[in-house]
Amino acid sequence: MSKKFNKYLFFFTSFIIFVGLFYVLFNSSVNFVLYPFAFGMLFALCWANQKIWLITPAYIVAGAIFRPTLEFSICTLVCAFCLIVPYFIHILCKKNIKKWEFFVYAIVGQTANMVFDILAGVFPALPFASIVLGCLFMFACMNVFEAFIIRGFSNKLTTLEIISLFSIIACLSGGLVALNIYTFSFLKLFVSFVVLVFAFCSTPTLTILVASICGLGSIIATNNAVFMAPFILWALAVLLFKKRLRIFMVIAMIAVELVIGYYFKLYYSFGYLQILPLLISAVAFMGIPKNWCREISVVFNLSKDRVAMKNVVNRNREILHNRLGNLSEIFNDMNIIYRNLIKQGMTLDEVKVVLEQEIKDKICSFCPDRNHCHRTFSDSTKKVFDELITIAYERGRATLLDIPSFLTSRCKQTTAILGSVNTLTAQYKKYMGMVKDVDTSKIIIADQLLGVSKIMGGLSKEIESNVSFDTSRENKILDELTYFNIICIDAVVFEKDEWTMEVSLVVRTEDVQKQRIVDVASKVCGKKMTIYESFPSSRPGYSVLNLKTAPKYDCLFGVSQKTKNGSKVSGDNYSVVKLGSDKLLFAISDGMGSGEKAERTSDLSISLVENFYKAGFDNDLILSTVNKLLNLHKEEIFSAMDICVFDQKDGLVDFIKMASPNSFILTDEECKTVEAGALPMGIVEDAMPLIKKNVVGNGNMIVLVSDGISDSFKEADELKECIKSIKTKNPQEFADELLERALASNNGYAVDDMSVIAIKVLDF
């Protein structure tokens, strides 16, 4: 029973509130000539999903109280009828009423008013003006209801929504001007409460503005400016104590009202009944819970929090800049330490001296003829030892045939000397190999430390400057998106560098795919924008969209491959990777030979290169490091590498080649050749890549091939002519056709693993 009673009580209370709201708006006028606002509120409330069986009776009752005449009753009934009938027709058809349809029904609902005004001899323009003003008021109400009823109080109001809210407040103020009980002013009750709430929950600018708007509403209704100055003075007095307790704000407003009334005698009459509205609003204001105030402050005062947030962002960037700079120096110092730990092997001359001395100590020290050999014939003996060590070092083993006859004739230890030379030389070579591997490992570690140092130094430099946020553009984006019915609860616009502007938006998940978002961001930012990232927001039902300045170029690519006849797997591997800063990496890795071993080699090479590029290392350092890593293997692991790094911002292309075939750039006028060079990775420790730069433009085709393609043609020019003769502009079709022609030149037989990557450059 209690639940049912509470339900009825709620509906009765809501009905009374709606009756009061409509009655105030029926009283709101333009100089007591036009009364256009009540019907706009009726249709806007219906659009905001308020119960039609509650608001339409409230509208009719309020109209009857305002003007209890037959003509006016007919007008209110016709207006209600033009809302109820379409509403239930749409329900039967199971279709929602669109926003523009509400305006059509509202205009039709005013036909009775127009007829009675024309019959009464009213100037014809006035009924039309009343309808236009009513529709504008209805639009303002819809904007505010969408913000509060549909979106909730946790979102910042856009500029349009704030203007709409102020329009409603002005109309309510105009309707309350004439509603007095003796000298008790409902207008003062309303305005004093609004000023206190705005002062406490919004900015000083909005507080003074809302006070002025309330005064303006009373002027429009009565053509009397008596309330304008008091309202503004209330706002100024309250703002002086905004940062103190609420009670001081209340006292300041009442004190100003007493001074205005008793000292300046601004009102026609002044007594305790004119102070009572302020006292009632003060009590109501003091009773507002703090959590309500926080929710309201989000609606009006988010910009202040955003300024603090932006300052925190820039301060954190400064701290991160310093830390990254320090880490960069640490890794650079570690790089120097590791390089100083490199032992480096002895030279061959130094080895000869050491081994000679060890042979003397081991073999000759017990020989009775040692003085004769190493003193009388010291030069010739030393020369023999040097030659034996050199032969053993270079050939791997010295034999008796390498010992001169004059030494064998007088020395009885030639076999022992020969064995010692071979043994000690082999041990030395093994030791030097170990030292070389250790030194290579240290160099690799030092290179990586240096690379990390450079990356951190680059990141430190990148975030050195403060982020420049653009509040003006943020507000414009919010307003534009709201106009197109795209709910965006937050927007951040900032310049990353002189070329790149970034925008971060929090929009409804259902709006994420709308092209209008990109169009609005591009229009407001003055640059073509593109979405590069999208992920769910921490708030349910919303997603974060990150946009940035679109690069100058985009590209399409096609890949075509053929495994060597007789092989189960291809020794070719390719990679297409999106790098940071609008760069794309295309690569072909061709492992030595074909089959599983070649496939493992090329896969390892391409994986290392790909990950190093993703981490942000330099070209030279990447390939040098990968080359050293492959060279550490005891078994021979060679791999040709063909890399193309395409910068979408300016069309600059880096070709990085290690034993790869020629690449090609096909334009409308010519076919440019990017020549091959350098040794394969893993064959020589210090092999360096060949790097060439080129510039491409819209419509150009970049072609990368493995040696299985290039070797299928007898001459390089033959491959070039083949590429020029292919007419298709589709990169996948281009790659497929080039592979087919390469196979056709060998009667359909793949003599090696074959790979083609065709990259078509396009304007973004």
Image: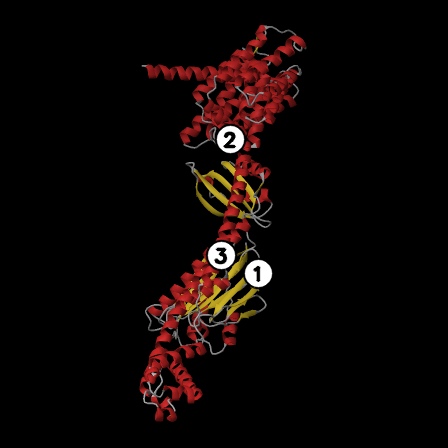
Indicate which disc residue 101 carries: 2
Which residue is labeled 1 in the image? Answer: 697
On screen, residue 39 above or below 464: above
Q: Label 1 is placed on what type of residue?
A: Gly
Regarding mark 3 in the picture, which secondary structure is present there? Answer: helix
Contact, CB < 8 Å: mark 3 with mark 1? no
Q: How many marks?
A: 3
Q: Which element carries disc 2, helix, strand or loop?
A: helix
Q: Nearer the viewer, residue 652 or 62?
A: 652
Residue sitting nearer the eye, 727 or 722:
722
Question: Quick one: SS at disc 1?
Answer: loop
Q: Quadrant of residue 173?
A: top right
Q: Nearer the viewer, mark 1 or mark 2?
A: 1
Of the image marks 2 and 3, the number of the one nearer the N terminus: 2
Mark with earlier residue (3, 1): 3
Quarter of the N terminus within the rendering: top left
Residue at 49% over, 20% down: 80
Q: Could you tell me how far apart the alpha carbons at marks 2 and 3 are, in whole angstroms?
A: 72 Å
Q: CA distance from mark 1 to mark 2?
A: 50 Å
Pointer 3: what residue?
333
Earlier residue among tags 1 and 2: 2
**What amino acid is labelled 2 in the image?**
Glu
Q: Which mark is residue 31?
A: none
Which residue is more in the foreground, 645 or 743?
A: 645
Point out residue 647 in the picture as x, y percentages from the top left corner: 54, 58
In the depicted view, which residue is nearer to us: 684 or 567?
684
Query: What's under tag 3, amino acid-wise?
Result: Asp
